[in-house]
Image (spheres, helix red, strand yellow):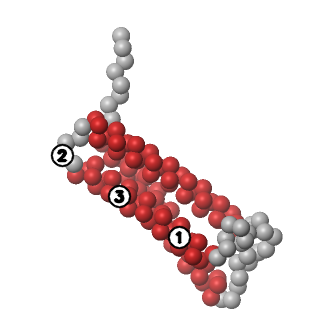
Amino acid sequence: MKKQPKLLQKNKLLRSSIITLVGLAILVTVIYWIAHFLEEIQSLGLSLEFTPFFFPSTHPFFLSIYKCYVLVLIANLFLCIDIWRRKIHTQEYLKQAFILLQVIRFLEYAMWLLFLYISVEIIFPFGGGNI
């Protein structure tokens, strides 16, 4: 007997995209908080010494990362809304939405890893400097 391929279901896809949306929202909030924390440190006259190769200028670097995170968050939000509001869910549409969700998840994991690296660099700079 030949196995039939598993059909994608709207509810599972919507739940996965909402979970990803929550993870991205947490990440964006934390990055936003850290950017303000760095501004406060620099306003007190303290300098942050990062590895020069990775962090030539701290604040603009964080802003560019933050903009990318927000764009991925908005893309996931639109995907959630589209899955939720669409009346007819063909398997072809669900496959495309699933692939898009996998790309967004990959970007989310990459952003978490970059955030983790930045956090470690702030706490333990590899260049030998410190706050």
Disc number for residue 64:
1
Rendered image quadrant of residue 41: bottom right
Q: Earlier in the sequence, mark 1 or mark 2?
A: 1
The x and y percentages for residue 23 are: 46, 56
Disc number for residue 107:
none
Which residue of the protein is positioned furthest toward the top in this rendering? 1
Mark 2 crowdedness (10 Å alpha carbons): few <14, some 14-19, many ≥20: few
The x and y percentages for residue 118 are: 64, 65
The x and y percentages for residue 70 are: 44, 65
Quadrant into which the C terminus falls: bottom right
Quadrant into which the N terminus falls: top left
Side of 86 relative to 103 (left or right): left
Residue 42 in sight from this viewpoint: yes
Rendered image quadrant of residue 119: bottom right
Q: Earlier in the sequence, mark 1 or mark 3?
A: 1
Side of 38 relative to 1 (left or right): right
Query: Dot 1: what SS?
Result: helix
Residue 12 in sight from this viewpoint: no
Disc number for residue 77:
3
- The residue drawn where x is 42% and y is 63% is 71
Q: CA distance from mark 1 to mark 2?
A: 37 Å
The x and y percentages for residue 46 are: 70, 85
Which residue position holds label 2?
Answer: 87
Q: Earlier in the sequence, mark 3 or mark 2?
A: 3
Mark 3 crowdedness (10 Å alpha carbons): few <14, some 14-19, many ≥20: some
Looking at the picture, which amino acid does disc 3 mark? Answer: Leu
- The residue drawn where x is 55% and y is 79% is 36
Q: CA distance from mark 1 to mark 3?
A: 20 Å
Side of 38 relative to 53 (left or right): left
Looking at the picture, which amino acid does disc 2 mark? Answer: Lys
Mark 1 crowdedness (10 Å alpha carbons): few <14, some 14-19, many ≥20: few
